[in-house]
Image (cartoon, helix red, strand yellow):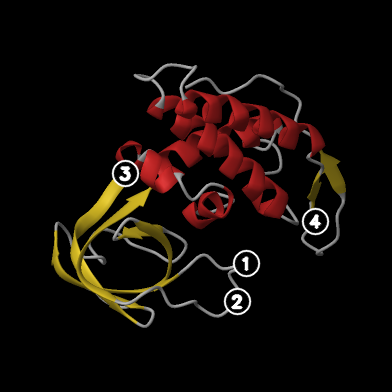
Amino acid sequence: MFGQDRDMLAIEPHAFTDALWAGRRLASGTAGIVGTTLTTTSSTAGFIDAQADAGQVVVFNGVPLEVTAVTSGTVLEVSRLRASIDDPPIAPAPSSGASFALVSFEPQRGIVHRQLLGMLGLDRPDGPDADTIVDVAPLAHAEALGTLHLVYAAASALSGPSSSLGARAVMYADMFARARRTLAVGLDLDGDGEIDATRRPVLAHLIRG
């Protein structure tokens, strides 16, 4: 995929509290944080077994945090949201015996990812694929917006389209549509690092949750 859960966190931190149940829960339990190190005291699964990875998001004591590294089955390195993944980690407030949930929206992001590839004609066995894309950053942003639409559409299923969750679903559908319209994806077809072709999305339908 083009992006990570932390790309969604950068746009909409509340998604990880508003719709935590809509994600794929990898592990949950209690933990403590000292500095940038989160250590579990009890957990439904070890982080290694749960396939935890940098770029995911852990909600600790109600606060979504970036996962910057997986040290062991019981230890994560975490950070408050940074402006860039290249910035040094920012230590959260220290705490012990607090609840945590490691949740990923990767399944929803996969749906949007495949849709974007299809719109760009990069899903055909006889043509260029995603490996030829020179810069995935704009696609990661669009992918995050489309995923947020799916997440909020699911979250608003019971409360209805006029609810605050429904309004966010509509907002992110519109933002995803606008992001798609501005995409111009450069492709390196011969592997020399230079852009040889440019693709724009050719489909304009919205994802419907």
Nearest to viewer (mark 4 / mark 3): 3
**Location of mark 2 (residue):** 87
User: What is the C-alpha distance between the residues marked 3 and 1?
Assistant: 25 Å
Between residue 203 and residue 37, name the one nearer to us.
37
Residue for point 40% across, 73% down: 92
Do tag 3 and tag 1 residues touch (Cβ < 8 Å)?
no
Do tag 4 and tag 2 residues touch (Cβ < 8 Å)?
no
Say left or right for 109 vs 195. left
Which label number is shown at residue 7? none
N-terminal of the pair, mark 3 or mark 2, is: 3
Disc 3 crowd, CA 10 A, few/some/many (<14, 14-19, 20+):
some
**Location of mark 3 (residue):** 24
- Name the residue type under label 2: Asp
N-terminal of the pair, mark 4 or mark 2, is: 2
Q: Regarding mark 4 in the picture, which secondary structure is present there?
A: loop
Residue for point 61% across, 75% down: 86
Do tag 1 and tag 2 residues touch (Cβ < 8 Å)?
yes
Q: Regarding mark 3 in the picture, which secondary structure is present there?
A: strand
User: What is the C-alpha distance between the residues marked 1 and 2?
Assistant: 7 Å
Nearest to viewer (mark 3 / mark 2): 2
Task: Report which quarter residue 73 is drawn in.
Answer: bottom left
**Location of mark 1 (residue):** 83
Which label number is shown at residue 190? 4
Q: Regarding mark 1 in the picture, which secondary structure is present there?
A: loop
Disc 1 crowd, CA 10 A, few/some/many (<14, 14-19, 20+):
few
Kindly tell me whether residue 204 is visible in this rendering: yes
- Name the residue type under label 4: Asp
Nearest to viewer (mark 1 / mark 4): 1
Say left or right for 62 vs 14. left
